[in-house]
Amino acid sequence: MNRIYLDHAATSPMHPEVVETFAQALGTIYGNPSSIHSTGRDARKALDEARRVFAESIHANDPEIVFTSGGTEADNMAIFGTAAKKEGKHIITSTIEHHAVLHACEKLEREGYDVTYLPVDENGLVQAEDVKKALRDDTILVTIMLGNNEVGTIQPIAEIGELLKDTDVTFHTDAVQAYGILPIDVEQLNVDLLSVSGHKLNGPKGIGFLYQRKGTPLEPLLFGGEQERKRRAGTENVPGIKAFAKAVAIAQEQKEARAAQYMHFKQLFKAVLQQEGVEFSENGANQLPHVLNLSMPGIEIESFLVNLDLAGISASSGSACTAGSIDPSHVLVAMFGENAEQSRNSIRFSFGIGLTEENIKQAAAKTAQISKRLALQ
């Protein structure tokens, strides 16, 4: 069976050129970047070159890039690092953030911090005006994601950044799902901190970075050596960083073409469902090009996903399967309410490299067949 992978928002396959770069680096760049001999300097050169690629991709300066083990560490570093460095006990976030943000905020609440969780509308959109209303004299951090990983909604980060830029409040955005898909300019967005992960755009897992605007106070999470200008201790993952930089270089060259292709795939998928007479509604608005979240009335999501898998289609739901039961996605609950049908019958298809029109047509046709079959049961 030729599988059709439609879960690129969860993780993406490494680009063949990235695999080649990764393998070559594993075998040839083995020095410690902190060593002063030529073998170490070769590794340092690879880091410097990669750092420049990342900085240019978001219109930042090279020293503002801090290598991390991925998006989760970058998010945690932004939140805990800010809390440890600034006076004040108030943080503003939204109800639809990734758990790397939400669980970090919950931990701070247990330590005496006050966290405001902003609501979203039925499209999953945070209102900048709500951020403004929530600001207090003791607010130290606002953390709002750039693009949602479940429904794809793009948040008004530039608008929020504009209202925060003349304040002492640190502004962080989780750009893990949007990076490599949307054009990102940290100056236009007016963000102080921005999180990125490699495996979402065809790079390796276990690598990412945090953009830290010059002058933004941040306490390190890890202590040891003086790597990353004393901001993140630990010998850098040179092969992973070099491979990630290759993935970013490819993504930057193909960004507009990829976005157009994924939007086409999205429209094609929905068109096939409509032709097959399948009832559905789309969750989210102003979406990331590669994310399609559909509510399909009358289906039981766990059974639907199992049947898709058996048919050779990899997709996902925002739901978490635990002990044989399914809890509704916190994102969909925030949008529709816990008892709403959309919170329990929604499925996410997400697109990426290697897919063709024929793949999309086949996947949509099989999705329609399964939907009809399950609706009769």
Image (tube, rainbow, N blue to C red):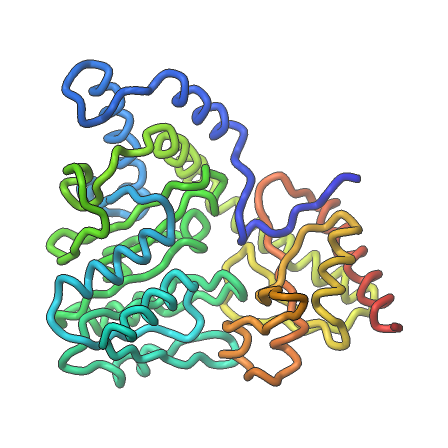
Q: Residue at x 66, y 59 (%)?
A: 267
Q: Quadrant of residue 96?
A: bottom left
Left or right relative to 265: residue 182: left
Task: State the residue in front, 128 or 330.
Answer: 330
Up-down relation of residue 95 to residue 233 (above or below): below
Number of marks drawn: 0
Residue at the far top: name it. 38
Q: What is the x, y in percent for residue 277?
A: 82, 69
Residue at the far front: name it. 323
Q: What is the x, y in percent for residue 245?
A: 37, 34
Q: Residue at x 45, y 41 (%)?
A: 205
Q: Residue at x 55, y 74 (%)?
A: 332
Q: Residue at x 19, y 65 (%)?
A: 83
Q: What is the x, y in percent for residue 55?
A: 27, 42
User: Quadrant location of the N terminus?
Assistant: top right
Q: Quadrant of residue 21?
A: top left
Task: State the residue in front, 32 or 154.
Answer: 32
Q: What is the x, y in percent for residue 128?
A: 32, 77
Up-down relation of residue 155 to residue 338 (above or below): above
Left or right relative to 235: residue 350: right
User: Quadrant location of the C terminus?
Assistant: bottom right
Left or right relative to 371: residue 134: left
